[in-house]
């Protein structure tokens, strides 16, 4: 066994060294995982090329040949996965699309494994060191080219999308590696397969292309830091700040956790983050926060949730903010701040405020009671306790103001003085309680006949006085007749006696239409009372149940 087989082994070992270097020197994320799978599949090809030449057993040779080409199918899948993760086109991983992407490579791998009728490979002179390839081999090559085309298409979509500003550099670097690998593989096929009858076999061609492409990828990972978004958040702040901070990328992969958060969450770098898992189940704010978190990824979201603690509930303020680079969201920063002490102080202040509010409410209640009592006292001072209408004192006060105004503006008004006819007979026949009921019922009937602006007052005993503002003699007469009719038609049921009674009233009507008095005083108001009282007396003298009108 000469030097030639060891070329592939050396290339395999170099790829293994690069694999270990990447694994040991970077923070493992989904992108790094995808790349490591891709890198591992790259290592198998040179290993198998070496192993084929280390045995004379055709069965082992065939096994290594099949393993090498099955590896290329896996390489195509890993290649595509790596491209999808790199460009962020996770939509290609939906179930139906992913089947279309990965099933061809798996079917070709099965065809390579079973090699039906030697359609994939056949030995030359009983050994697979030299071999011929059948139609299944060329179908396999076509499939690899198709995967290259799909990967290039996905990269093109990323470059022309809004994400191009963020990933343009890393895509170009990876694209260089893929193009180098593709160029060497195609050259290997053309020279060592297509032209094998005319040219000697050139060993390690594809293996060397794989190694060069791996070097491009490693440079992209370390020098250009194409997978690294941790630089957006400053590590020194993470490790010293008391607030718990979690950084995730746009695939919800954990990129960084600071020391303040680690004791409270079961997460490590590279884990998939599910915010639902860390929120309390019984919070009424949970769904509202989740809706904003899911549907508004470019907006800041904040909530305060309560967690069950050992001794008392823990109030945690959660804030989510997007990490923006050149106007694009590349991840999120989630902060967790324990506000239990602040909440305790707020609650204590709130309790003190509530105590003050209760005291204030008590004082307000007392003040309200005093106000209502004063109102009742004022009402009692101006109203008649039996009928609820105004008393004579209140009417006199009002008339002192009204008469002055009417005199100044030449506004006509009228005064009605009425008396219940034969009221003494009612008291003597049915008693004073019935007499009181009659008075109250009569007042209600009178109120229904009056206007809203008219003032009814009890003048004394069964006598009532009515002030009719802004009323001429004709209007006053009509109102007086309406009051008289309302009282006369008012039927009153006497309790415990199967009968009803109705009463009549006598009325004196005084209309003021002239205003000769320049400065009306109390004496003028007394004159008005005397005049209307004379009119009432005249109505009684003429037989009651009538109205006597006079005017001034």
Image (tube, rainbow, N blue to C red):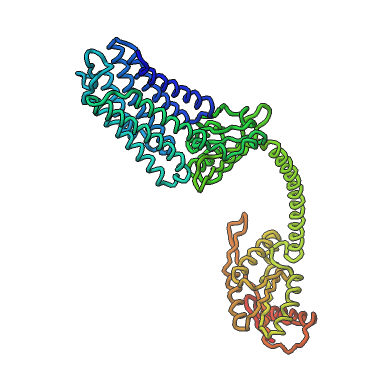
Q: Residue at x 59, y 41 (%)?
A: 319
**Residue 391 left/right relative to 103:** right
Q: Residue at x 44, y 45 (%)?
A: 164
Q: Residue at x 37, y 39 (%)?
A: 154
Examine the image and state in which quarter residue 373 appears.
bottom right
Examine the image and state in which quarter residue 205 appears.
top left
Work out whether residue 118 or residue 243 is closer to the camera in this orientation and state it.
118
Q: Position of residue 544 (x, y in %)?
A: 65, 76
Q: Position of residue 259 (x, y in %)?
A: 64, 30
Q: Residue at x 33, y 19 (%)?
A: 67
Q: Position of residue 130 (x, y in %)?
A: 26, 18
Examine the image and state in which quarter residue 350 appears.
top right
Work out whether residue 204 or residue 394 is closer to the camera in this orientation and state it.
204
Judge whether residue 344 can be spotted in this image. Answer: yes
Q: Position of residue 138 (x, y in %)?
A: 24, 28
Q: Quadrant of the N terminus?
A: top left
Outermost residue to the bottom: 516
Work out whether residue 377 or residue 202 is closer to the camera in this orientation and state it.
202
404 above or below 109? below
396 above or below 361? below
377 above or below 489? above
Work out whether residue 510 or residue 266 is closer to the camera in this orientation and state it.
266
Q: Quadrant of the C terminus?
A: bottom right
């Amino acid at each position: 066994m000469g030097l030639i087989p060891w070329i592939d082994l050396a290339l395999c070992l170099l790829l293994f060294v690069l694999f270990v270097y990447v694994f040991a020197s970077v923070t493992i994320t989904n992108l790094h995982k995808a790349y490591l799978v891709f890198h591992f599949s790259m290592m198998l090809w040179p290993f198998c090329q070496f192993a084929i030449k280390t045995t004379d057993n055709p069965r082992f040779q065939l096994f290594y040949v099949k393993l090498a080409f099955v590896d290329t199918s896996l390489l195509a899948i890993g290649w595509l996965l790596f491209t999808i993760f790199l460009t962020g086109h996770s939509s290609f991983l939906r179930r139906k699309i992913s089947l279309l992407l990965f099933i061809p490579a798996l079917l070709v791998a099965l065809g390579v494994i079973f090699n039906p009728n030697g359609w994939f490979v056949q030995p030359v002179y009983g050994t697979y060191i030299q071999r011929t390839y059948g139609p299944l081999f060329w179908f396999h090559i076509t499939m690899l080219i198709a995967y290259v085309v799909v990967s290039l298409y996905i990269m093109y979509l990323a470059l022309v999308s809004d994400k191009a500003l963020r990933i343009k550099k890393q895509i170009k670097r990876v694209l260089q590696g893929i193009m180098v690998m593709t160029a060497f593989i195609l050259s290997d096929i053309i020279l060592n397969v297509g032209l094998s009858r005319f040219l000697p076999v050139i060993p390690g061609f594809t293996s060397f292309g794989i190694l060069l492409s791996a070097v491009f990828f490693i440079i992209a990972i370390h020098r250009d830091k194409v997978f690294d978004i941790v630089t957006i958040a400053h590590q020194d702040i993470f490790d010293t700040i008391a607030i718990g901070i979690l950084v995730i990328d746009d695939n919800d992969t954990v990129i960084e956790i600071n020391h303040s958060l680690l004791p409270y969450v079961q997460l490590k770098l590279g884990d998939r983050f599910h915010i639902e898992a860390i929120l309390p189940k019984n919070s009424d704010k949970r769904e509202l926060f989740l809706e904003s978190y899911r549907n508004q990824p470019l907006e800041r979201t904040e909530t305060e949730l309560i967690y069950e603690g050992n001794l008392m509930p823990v109030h945690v303020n959660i804030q989510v903010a997007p990490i923006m680079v050149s106007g694009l969201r590349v991840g999120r920063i989630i902060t967790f701040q324990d506000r239990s002490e602040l909440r305790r102080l707020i609650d204590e202040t709130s309790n003190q405020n509530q105590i003050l509010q209760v005291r204030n409410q008590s004082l307000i209640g007392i003040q309200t009671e005093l106000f209502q009592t004063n109102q009742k006292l004022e009402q009692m001072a101006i109203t008649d306790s039996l009928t609820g209408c105004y008393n004579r004192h209140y009417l006199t006060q009002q008339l002192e103001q009204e008469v002055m105004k009417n005199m100044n503006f030449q506004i006509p008004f009228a005064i009605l003085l009425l008396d219940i006819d034969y009221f003494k007979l009612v008291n003597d026949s049915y008693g004073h309680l019935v007499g009181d009921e009659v008075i109250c019922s009569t007042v209600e009937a009178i109120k229904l006949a009056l206007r809203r602006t008219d003032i009814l007052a009890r003048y004394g005993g069964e006598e009532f006085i009515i002030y009719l503002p802004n009323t001429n003699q004709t209007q006053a007469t009509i109102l007086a007749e309406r009051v008289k009719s309302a009282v006369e038609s008012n039927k009153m049921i006497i309790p415990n006696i199967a009968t009803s009674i109705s009463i009549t009233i006598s009325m004196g009507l005084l209309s003021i239409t002239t205003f000769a008095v320049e400065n009306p005083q109390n004496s003028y108001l007394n004159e008005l009372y005397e005049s209307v009282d004379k009119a009432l007396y005249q109505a009684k003298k003429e037989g009651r149940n009538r109205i006597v009108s006079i005017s001034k």
